[in-house]
Amino acid sequence: MKETDLIIIGAGPGGYKAAVYAAKHGLKVVIFEDVNVGGTCLNVGCIPTKTYVHSATFGEAVERQPQVVEALRGGVETLLSHPNITLVREKAKFIDAGTIEASPSGEVWRGANIIVATGSSAKMLPIPGADRQNVGSSTELLALKELPKRLCIIGAGVIGMEFASVFQKFGSEVTVVEYLKECLPMVDSDIAKRLRKLLEKRGITFYMGAGVKSIDGSTVLFEQKGKEVSVEADFILIATGRKANTEGLNLEAAGIALAPNGTIPVDEHFKAKTLSNSPLKGEKTSEENLPLTGEDTGQKVSPLRGDLEGSSIFAIGDVNGRQMLAHAAEMQGIHVVNRILGIEDKIRFEVMPAAIFTEPEAACVGPTEDQLKEQGTPFECHKSFYRANGKALAMNETEGMVKLCCEPEEGKLLSAHVFGAHAADIVQEVTAFITLGATLRQLRETVHIHPTLSEVLIEVN
């Protein structure tokens, strides 16, 4: 048996960033990855998708995608060549709460701390015909070498909307079928509706409030407002969510039971919740994860040993189901390593920006207007539009809107929801203000370069 300070299972954004950060702080790290380093995001997710978004034609996208992925994957490989990191290209499973076995070699490692960072995979609809050859997830769609003339997308979340936008641009006839009443449920409904309407003007057909019943050959059958509707498509993309990758980890041996949604339950510091009779002697598994507060409990942590007897197990990224975003996984990994090292940080996980790279973009941080109303939080809403912005006019990007929510009388900023050119960059600026507890007045009094799109933030009324 070999021993190390930290074992990480999975070399996606959360895993490899945690490994590099830990290694730079002097920890000996063993990281397991049985497929490609970089995880879903780099290999078959956000990076390939963004390559498509920024390509003029489908042919150019197909050619550029593997080049971009291979270059970035090589960069990750270089990072993981740090002398304190051992990359094991095998599957990993728990023998007990502190011991991991590699497969197929049978090599055994014991770690003072273990991080599970195995990510997620596409969740397919349990409907007849979902296993047909012309049906698949984003992975299969990105593998196509010929542009589908007709593309039907089931699901109007981030993945569905991004692919709808980009394949319509390439020339596909795109139809989106969504069970909910509106697209992008994480985005303010006003912003989401305006973006959908804009995409409809560009030729994308949306069926909202529609429940898919089956797929028969090239026909998608669904029900909308009590009526049976069908759509013909050459390829059918299932974009209805993702599921945590936990199969084969043998989590039971570590005393970990999955939550009902299949994720690993964790506490506010991403420590896996364990059964009372597990080797970790931890808490009983809860059916729901605790909310993240972003505040330190004040509990001191012993370097390397964690805050439990024996090894401590953590779960970061998609596998814990908290915030299924690559940048969330990265920051969770850094926070866990800080806990292991006894370093206090002030990362605010409840302030988590997100972006949808449609054309134009949409982005958000903080609660929506509807959520603030449901919570009974006093707030005021301020809006501005791209059409009144000089840079937007010069760029011919006049379609766009900003919505800022704050405490009354231009008080503390609570959220930002934007659609339009470079929406992600604009929301990132607001994220910094929210993280620091700044007010709308302070944002207004911050000098902004003219002419820039960011001036839409101080033009809200």
Image: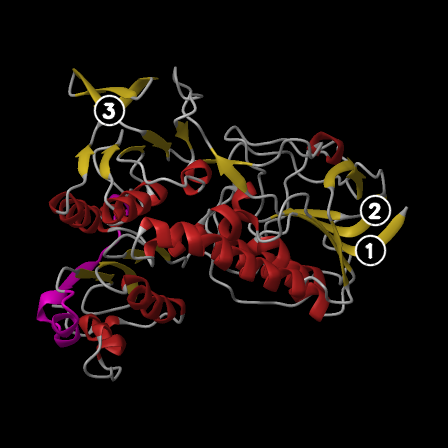
Instruction: Specify whether 177 is left or right of 436.
Output: left
Query: Looking at the image, which residue is at 49% across and 50% down?
Result: 41
Residue 70 picture quarter: bottom right
Does 150 appear in magenta?
Answer: no
Query: Looking at the image, which residue is at 27% across and 78% down?
Result: 442
Could you tell me if residue 17 is visible in this image?
A: no
Identify residue type, mark 2.
Trp
Which residue is identified by label 3?
A: 232
Image position, residue 37 (x, y; %): 62, 52
Along the viewing direction, whichever of 265 and 119 lies nearer the viewer: 119
Instruction: Specify whether 282 is left or right of 124.
Output: right
Q: Secondary structure at mark 3?
A: strand
> Which disc number belongs to residue 109?
2
Which residue is identified by label 1?
A: 4
Q: Which residues are magenta?
A: 374-397
Image position, residue 53 (x, y; %): 33, 54
Could you tell me if residue 384 is visible in this image?
A: yes
Question: Height in image: 173 above or below 197?
Answer: above
Image position, residue 293 (x, y; %): 47, 55
